[in-house]
């Protein structure tokens, strides 16, 4: 019998506002940082209906950034740019499957 598949949490993207379980680049900032605060424009456009407490808590933490890898790459992150190139621009479940296959070898 194979182990139960782990459920992936829903999270917002700090850049595009998307709420999904896709892979993210998560960065912990300094305790006194406010760089992770979402913009008023982003907050106004969010669909909070499907969000759970975990997603809202992460979004409201000013010391944490949570971004889709492609959004982060487009925002200038060298790590995510390299990851995007390595993963050939896969998105969503295709990217999750690709990363799980690479991890399981």
Image (tube, rainbow, N blue to C red):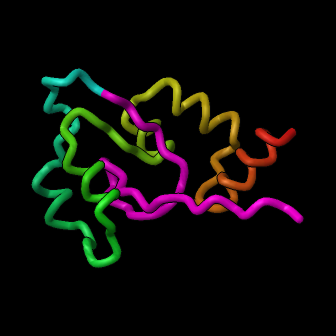
Q: Quadrant of residue 74?
A: top left
Residue at the front extreme of this rendering: 1
Residue 59 at x, y = what percent? Answer: 26, 51
Query: Is the residue 48 above or below the residue 102 in the image?
Result: below
The answer to whether 100 appears left or right of 8 in the picture is right
Bounds of the magenta segment:
1-28
Say which quarter of the image contains residue 28: top left
Q: Point out the image quarter for the N terminus.
A: bottom right
Tell me where residue 75 appears, x and y as whole percent.
37, 36
105 on left or right of 4: right
Residues 91 and 55: in front is 55
Q: In the image, 32: left or right of 18?
A: left
**Residue 22 at x, y = what percent?**
53, 56
Q: Quadrant of the image for the C terminus?
A: top right
Q: Is residue 73 magenta?
A: no
In this view, the residue farthest toward the bottom is 49
* Residue at position x 29%, y 49% in the image: 58
Q: Quadrant of residue 30?
A: top left
Q: Is residue 83 above or below residue 46?
A: above
Q: Using residue 18 as the reference point, say whether residue 104 is left or right of it.
A: right
Q: Nearer the viewer, residue 79 or 54?
A: 54
Residue 2 is covered by the magenta coloring: yes
Q: Name the residue at 55% across, 59% down.
A: 8
Viewer-proximal residue among 2 and 91: 2
Q: Residue at x 37, y 43 (%)?
A: 66
- Dominant secondary structure (helix, strand or loop) of the stretch shown in magenta: loop
């Amino acid at each position: 019998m194979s182990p139960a598949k782990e459920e992936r949490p829903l999270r917002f993207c700090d850049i595009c506002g998307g709420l999904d379980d896709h892979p993210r680049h998560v960065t912990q900032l300094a305790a006194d940082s406010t760089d992770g605060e979402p913009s008023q424009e982003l907050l106004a456009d969010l669909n909070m209906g499907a969000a759970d407490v975990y997603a809202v808590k992460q979004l409201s933490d000013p010391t944490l950034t949570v971004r889709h890898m492609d959004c982060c790459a487009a925002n200038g992150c060298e790590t995510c740019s390299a990851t995007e190139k390595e993963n050939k621009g896969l998105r969503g479940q295709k990217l999750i499957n690709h990363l799980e296959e690479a991890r399981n070898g």
